Image (tube, rainbow, N blue to C red):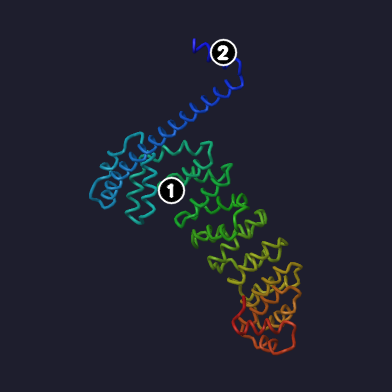
Amino acid sequence: MIGAQILDFYLERPGLALLIFGNIVFLLGTLFLAFAALALRSRNDHKAARWRRLEGRWETKTLEVVTETAPAQAAWDLVDPKDQLRFVSFLLRFARRLTGTERKRVDDLAAPYLDQLLPQLTARQPERRARAIQTLATLGQRRYHTQIERSLSDPSPLVSMVAARSLARRESPDFAVSILGHLHRFGHWRPSFLASMLASVGPAVAPALRTALGDPSFDPKVRGVAADALRELNDYSAGDVAAQVLATTVDRDLLVATLGLLSHVGRAEHLPAVRAHLESTEPIVRARVASALGRIGGPDDIAKLTAAFDDPSPWVALRAAEALHERRDPVLSELAESNHPRAALARQMLKGGGA
C-alpha cells in the first residue's frame, strides 16, 4: 500500500522522479570512479614497490659485476623474461655514472637484451622510437650503428635529432657525412648548437666539414653550420676553402659564418677575399669583415677599419673600434681625442668597456 502511494507520488511528478534518479546515478558513478582510482593507485603502488625491490637487487649485483666480484651471469639470473626491458632501462641510468672498463662491463650486461628494442624503432610514438635509439646508442656502442644511421631519415625531427646526437661521437667521425646530409632537417635548432654537436666529434670530423663547406650542392645553412664547427675546431686547413666560399656565395648567413671562420684561421693570402665584402649591403657582413681585418689584417687595413668606424651602422662602427683596439693602433686614441661623432665609443673602447 505504501509502495503504491510512493509510486503514484512520483508518477504524478515525473520531473522530480527524473532528478532523484539522476542524482542516484551520479552518486553511483562517483563511487565507482573513486573505487577505480583507489584500485589503480593501489596497483601502481604495488608495481612501484616491486620495481624498487627489483632494482635494489639489480643494483647490488650490478655493482659486484662491475667491480669483478661476481660474474655477469649472477646479474642475469635475477632478470625475469618479462622484466628484461626494465633491466635495460635500469642499466641505462646506471651506465651514465661510469666510464672506462667499468662502463664497458655495464654494456656487456645489457648486450643480451638490446635486440628486444629493435621493434620499438618502428613504434607509432616518436618518443618511443627516440628512447630506443638513445638506449641502443648508449649501451650498444657501434653494434647498432646501421639502425641508428637509418633513423636519421625518421619522419619525426625529434627521432632524427636523437640519432644525429647519438652518432656524433669522438669514436665515430665516419658518420659525419650522414649527419651533414640530414642537417637541413634541423632548421628549428640553433646553428650554434648544431655546430657544437659536430665539433664534439673532434678534429677527425674536419675533412667532412671542409667538404660540406665548399660544396655548393649543400644547403647554405648546412654550410654555415660546417663553418661554425670548423671555427670551434680551430681548423687552419679550412682557410683556403673559406676564402673560395667568400668569392662565390651571396648568401648572407653563409658569408657571416665563413667570415667568422676566417677571423680565427685566416692568413694573409685570404685577405683579398675578406676585403671584397667591405662594401656589402648587409651591416652584419660588414661588421664581420671589420672583425676579420682586426684579427688577420695587415697595416694597409688600418685605413679600412678607420673608414668602417664611420659606417652608418653602429654595429659596424663598434666592430671596427674593437678591431682597432685589438691591433693597438694609435688611430683609436686619435679618434677618442677628436671631435668625431663617435669619439665617446673610442674612449669607451680604450677604457675596456667594449661589447
**Amino acid type, residue under disc 1 in the picture:** Arg
- Front-lying residue, 64 or 31: 31
Mark closest to the chain's N terminus, 2 or 1? 2
Q: Residue furthest left?
A: 69
Q: Is residue 205 above or below residue 37?
A: below
Question: How many numbered dots are placed on residues in this image?
Answer: 2
Q: Residue furthest top?
A: 1
The percent coordinates of residue 148 (x first, y second) are: 49, 45
To which residue does mark 2 refer? 8
Q: Secondary structure at mark 2?
A: helix
Q: Residues within 10 Å of mark 1 (few under 14, many from 20)?
A: some
To which residue does mark 1 refer? 142
Identify which residue is drawn at 26% across, 49% down: 64
Identify which residue is drawn at 68% across, 72% down: 289
- Front-lying residue, 306 or 227: 306
The percent coordinates of residue 113 (x first, y second) are: 37, 39
Identify which residue is drawn at 54% across, 68% down: 234
The percent coordinates of residue 200 (x first, y second) are: 49, 60
Q: Secondary structure at mark 1?
A: helix
Q: Is residue 47 above or below residue 350?
A: above
26 lies left or right of 114 = right
Residue 239, located in which quarter of the rendered image?
bottom right
Residue 291, located in which quarter of the rendered image?
bottom right
Q: Residues within 10 Å of mark 2 (few under 14, many from 20)?
A: few
Q: Is residue 304 above or below residue 253?
A: below
Identify which residue is drawn at 51% across, 49% down: 162
Q: Quadrant of the C terminus?
A: bottom right
The percent coordinates of residue 279 (x first, y second) are: 76, 72
